[in-house]
Amino acid sequence: MIEGVRTKNLVAHPDERGRLWEILRSDDDLFDTFGQVYVTTAFPGIVKAWHAHRLQTDFFTVISGRAKFVLYDMREGSRTKGELAEFFLGRDKLQLITIPPGVYHGFMCLGEEEVLALNCPTRPYNAQTPDELRLPFDTDQIPYRWNEPGG
């Protein structure tokens, strides 16, 4: 596992009306601080990658559809530098992924329906000075190919 990446298995509580599942609580061991909450989507087959943050920690989960999340550690001095990690999230895998600063990440919509991914990062977005590092999805700097099984 990439240094600093943590996961939390989420539990759905169904009843005759539907389901409820908690995603992130302030008393969770992995909780840091609150910045904002947003939903990002991708259409079938679309890849949204690569980006990382200098300061922000992300807390991602999928609330509808299915997605493959891929993380890559490019951090100097990290004991897991050069490691890749794949996570498949959706209805059949309710999980929260904690992505620390400096870890590049992205996701790809799997299946035939738009995926809705929820993020609860530790910092609010600042349009004047974005806390973002970006690389194209097909960069040679990350040894991963999105449309090939296992990258």
Image (cartoon, rainbow, N blue to C red):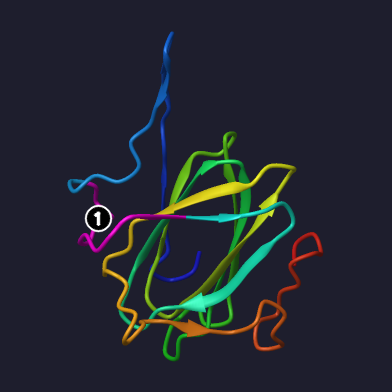
The outermost residue toward the right is 148
Judging by the rendered image, the residue that carries numbered circle 1 is 31
- Identify which amino acid the numbered label 1 is placed on: Phe
Q: Residue at x 64, y 47 (%)?
A: 114
Q: Identify the image quadrant of the C terminus.
A: bottom right
Magenta-drawn stretch, dominant element (helix, strand or loop):
loop
Residue segment shown in magenta: 28-39
Q: Depth check: give the residue in front, 98 or 118.
A: 118
Q: Depth check: give the residue in front, 42 or 6.
A: 42
Decide if residue 63 is on the left or right side of residue 87: left
Q: Depth check: give the residue in front, 43 or 6.
A: 43
Q: Residue at x 65, y 82 (%)?
A: 136
Q: Position of residue 143 (x, y in %)?
A: 70, 80
Decide if residue 91 is on the left or right side of residue 54: right
Q: Residue at x 43, y 8 (%)?
A: 16
The outermost residue toward the front is 128
Decide if residue 19 is on the left or right side of residue 106: left
Q: Residues within 10 Å of mark 1 (few under 14, many from 20)?
A: some
Identify the element where label 1 is drawn.
Answer: loop
Q: Position of residue 83 (x, y in %)?
A: 58, 75
Q: Position of residue 122 (x, y in %)?
A: 27, 65
